[in-house]
Image (cartoon, grey):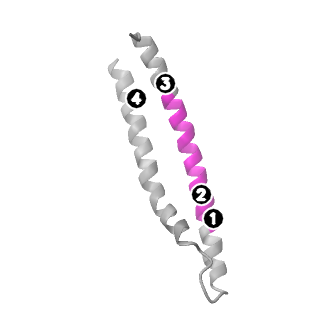
Amino acid sequence: MASIGEVRAALEQASEILRESYRNVRSAQEGLDEAVAILAESSENHHESLLPPEFVRAKERFPDQLELMVGTLERIQQLTVEL
């Protein structure tokens, strides 16, 4: 059986990993936003779009994923306080 200290340490480690993951996802979101803008602008000079539909779908999913990460981090913080 784990002690409360061990549980808190595990929760802190999970929080740090989640915060780093959040930063990485935000960075990926910014990169994708830039790529979408460049491809959309470049598409104006072509007879068909250069923008893959998967990029648009991925761009649409970022806010939900980030919200889920924030909610999870908030819950971990609540659990830590309750211990």
Report the number of numbered marks. 4
Quadrant of the image for the C terminus? top left
Secondary structure of the residue carrying tag 3 is: helix
N-term mark: 3 or 1? 3
Residue toward you, 43 or 78: 43
Secondary structure of the residue carrying tag 2 is: helix
Query: Label 4 crowding class (10 Å Cα cut-off): few <14, some 14-19, many 20+?
Result: some
Query: Label 2 crowding class (10 Å Cα cut-off): few <14, some 14-19, many 20+?
Result: few
N-term mark: 2 or 3? 3
- Residue 54: where, in percent of width, then height? 53, 67
Tag of residue 34:
1
Residue at 44% from the left image edge and 43% from the top image edge: 69
68 relative to 45, above or below: above
Residue at 48% from the left image edge and 56% from the top image edge: 62
Tag of residue 77:
4
Q: Which residues are magenta?
A: 14-35
Residue 33 quadrant: bottom right
Secondary structure of the residue carrying tag 4 is: helix
Q: CA distance from mark 2 to mark 1?
A: 6 Å
In magenta segment, residue 15: yes
Quadrant of the image for the N terminus? top left
Q: CA distance from mark 4 to mark 3?
A: 8 Å
Say if mark 1 contacts mark 4, CB within 8 Å.
no
Which residue ends up furthest to the left in the rendered image?
A: 82
Q: Mark 1 belongs to which amino acid?
A: Glu
Q: CA distance from mark 2 to mark 3?
A: 27 Å
Dot 3 corresponds to which residue?
A: 12
Say if mark 3 contacts mark 1, CB within 8 Å.
no
Give the left or right position of residue 50, taking residue 7 as reference. right
Q: CA distance from mark 1 to mark 4?
A: 33 Å
Q: CA distance from mark 3 to mark 1?
A: 33 Å
